[in-house]
């Protein structure tokens, strides 16, 4: 049990664009700060849309995290022994219906089923060539002050490396279609996700699923949806973990940057938005720290530990 320095007992961390840069890199400064917070008596937990099988190795192997709230709260794991404490998947029939309902939108799907992650190959193509893909983003920057052909090519190469890394990650099972795996998921599907490159069509798909009543749907950016069972979110997973370890919600702090982090703001005493967070996330936050590129989480922890040492709670 944490000593709850200055009234804080539990810290929740989103991964992508909060602790993790460019899909895989975690700054040594961030890892050092996380370790210092744990040594000071804080309980640390991941709060990610990712399943545990594709959480960054540098985070898991460092041993700085105590728990994992993964797949948008559909699974909670104690990391020291890998035991699953909570599992709240979509029923197989509901997952199949979700897939069928969005069929006309031609999405690229992914699904997290138990300890496995499945990604359709079409998704890699969207990540590279779609309207918001790496090539499109690089093209838009070509005429800017920091643009030019060389800058564009660098961004394209970076995008290709990222997409290739995702497609070949040994924990990712790249498939032509997600459907057979949904059909075989008799114990349920922890989380489904999809990319619909057209923003307007993605919004229509969101409304369709949200109106159904069986799904918790989050829109990430303008072209991605994340789907869990109704009532299952990072917030519900975090609330369950707080009860499990005996930490009052007012003694919890969460960090995030995207739409699926907003439920954390509803259940934690303090929610810290990253400097690179979406505007709606910043509006819901108690405060805003530096961006992921600035090691914002590390700076916040360093300042907090300094306050703890001085005995002056913020």
Image (tube, grey):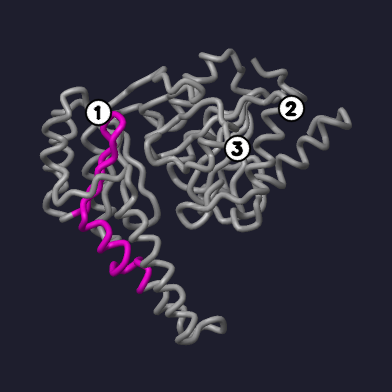
Q: Which residues are magenta?
A: 107-135
Q: Nearer the viewer, mark 1 or mark 3?
A: 1
Q: Tell which of 79 and 292 is nearer to you.
A: 79
Q: What is the distance, in whole Å, between disc 1 and disc 3 at their CAs?
A: 27 Å
Give above or below for 313 relative to 100: above
| Circle 3 crowding by C-alpha within 10 Å: few under 14, some 14–19, many from 20 | many
- The image's mark for residue 271 is 3
**Residue located beneath label 2 in the image:** 40
SS state under label 2: loop
- In this rendering, would 148 be left or right of 250? left
Q: Quadrant of residue 152?
A: bottom left
Which residue is at 39% across, 40% downward?
Answer: 50
**Is residue 242 found left or right of 205 in the rendered image?**
right
Q: How far, Cα to Cα, is label 1 from label 2? A: 38 Å
Q: Which mark, by number, is residue 90?
A: 1
Disc 3 is placed on an element classified as: strand
Where does the image place residue 153, in percent across and percent down from the top left?
42, 79
The magenta stretch spans residue 84: no
CB under 8 Å between discs 1 and 3: no
Horizontal and vertical percent for residue 278? Answer: 51, 53
**Helix, strand or loop at disc 1?**
loop
Residue 288 showing in the rendered view: no
Residue drawn at the location 34% of the way across and 21% of the way down: 87
Residue nearest the viewer, comparing 156 with 169: 169
Depth-wise, is mark 1 or mark 2 nearer the camera?
Answer: 2
Quadrant where the N terminus lies? top right
x and y percent of residue 63 in the render?
A: 57, 31
């Amino acid at each position: 049990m944490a000593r709850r320095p200055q009234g804080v007992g539990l810290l929740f961390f989103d991964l992508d664009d909060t602790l993790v840069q460019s899909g895989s890199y975690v700054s040594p400064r961030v890892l050092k700060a996380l370790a210092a917070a744990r040594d000071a008596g804080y309980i640390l937990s991941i709060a990610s849309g990712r399943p545990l099988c594709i959480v960054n190795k540098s985070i898991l192997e460092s041993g700085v995290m105590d728990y994992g709230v993964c797949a948008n709260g559909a699974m909670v794991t104690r990391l020291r022994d890998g035991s699953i404490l909570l599992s709240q998947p979509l029923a197989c029939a509901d997952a199949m219906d979700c897939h069928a309902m969005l069929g006309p939108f031609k999405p690229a799907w992914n699904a997290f089923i138990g300890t496995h992650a499945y990604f359709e190959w079409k998704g890699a193509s969207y990540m590279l060539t779609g309207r918001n893909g790496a090539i499109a983003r690089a093209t838009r920057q070509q005429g800017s002050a920091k643009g030019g052909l060389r800058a564009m090519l660098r961004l394209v190469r970076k995008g290709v490396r990222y997409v290739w890394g995702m497609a070949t990650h040994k924990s990712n099972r790249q498939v032509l279609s997600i459907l057979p795996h949904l059909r075989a998921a008799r114990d349920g599907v922890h989380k489904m996700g999809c990319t619909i490159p057209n923003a307007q069509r993605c919004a229509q798909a969101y409304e369709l699923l949200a109106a159904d009543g069986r799904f918790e749907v989050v829109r990430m950016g303008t072209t991605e949806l994340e789907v869990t069972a109704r009532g299952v979110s990072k917030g519900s997973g975090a609330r369950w973990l707080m009860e499990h370890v005996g930490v009052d919600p007012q003694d919890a702090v969460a960090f995030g940057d995207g739409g699926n982090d907003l439920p954390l703001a509803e259940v934690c005493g303090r929610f810290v938005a990253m400097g690179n967070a979406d505007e709606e996330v910043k509006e819901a936050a108690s405060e805003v720290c530096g961006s992921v590129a600035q090691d914002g989480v590390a700076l916040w922890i360093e300042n907090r530990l300094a306050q703890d040492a001085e005995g002056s709670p913020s």
